[in-house]
Amino acid sequence: MSLEDRDTAPLVGIVMGSQSDWETMRAGADILAALDVACEVRIVSAHRTPDRLFAYAEEAAPRGLRVIVAGAGGAAHLPGMLASKTRLPVLGVPVQSKALSGMDSLLSIVQMPKGIPVGTLAIGPAGAANAALLAAAMLATTDADLAGRLDAWRARQTAEVAEVPDDL
Ligand code: RP5
């Protein structure tokens, strides 16, 4: 089923600054789909669509979203600006940039001044996947069924780790 075809209202908003970020952020969307967490995916640029950013942030909580996962690269203002306009938890994913390999993205997202927090994950797809897992873990604190699915997901991951390299 497509992410957007679900009947249930989205609980997680995955937003990114550009179409070019989707390759990275897809890793998070795939995890939420595997955990059956309703989410939506949107392109919202702090620089190119600032009005869309303000509208998205202001409407997020009233629409029923519980967590926002925001990925951006370069001068990555998106997560911080979203966090400044909503009380929802914002998880920031630094997208790997071409010029500086994502260090610019990481520092832009992680160095929020005191008062407006952004939970910052690793650079790239690992960060996107972990942001989704963290969003699911937050939701699981009040959703026993999701807690069970998350526990099962983690148990499968553990079971897939071999004790010795297969080409030894
Ligand atoms: C940021 O600029 C986006 O988050 C993206 O990572 C970066 C480059 O965007 P494009 O020029 O590829 O659209 O706003």
Image: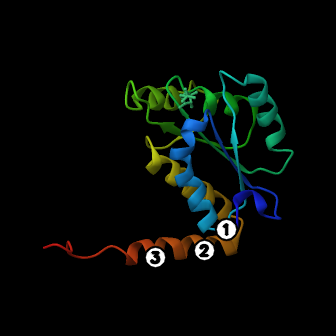
Residue 22: x %, y % from top left: 57, 44
Element under disc 1: loop
Please identify the quadrant where the C terminus is shown.
bottom left
Name the residue tied to disc 2.
Answer: 149
Name the residue tied to disc 1.
Answer: 36
How crowded pointer 3 is (Cα within 10 Å; few <14, some 14-19, many 20+) is rated as few
For the point 44% across and 30% down, the residue is 97
Residue 31: in sight, yes or no? yes
N-term-proximal mark, 2 vs 1: 1
Residue 26 image label = none
Q: Is residue 158 left or right of residue 86?
A: left
Residue 91: x %, y % from top left: 59, 43
Element under disc 3: helix
How far separated are the C-alphas under marks 2 and 1? 8 Å
Residue 145 vertical position relative to residue 8 in the rendered view, above or below: below
Residue 20: x %, y % from top left: 55, 36
**Closer to the observer: label 2 or label 1?**
1
Name the residue tied to disc 3.
Answer: 156
Q: Is residue 158 left or right of residue 43?
A: left
N-term-proximal mark, 3 vs 1: 1
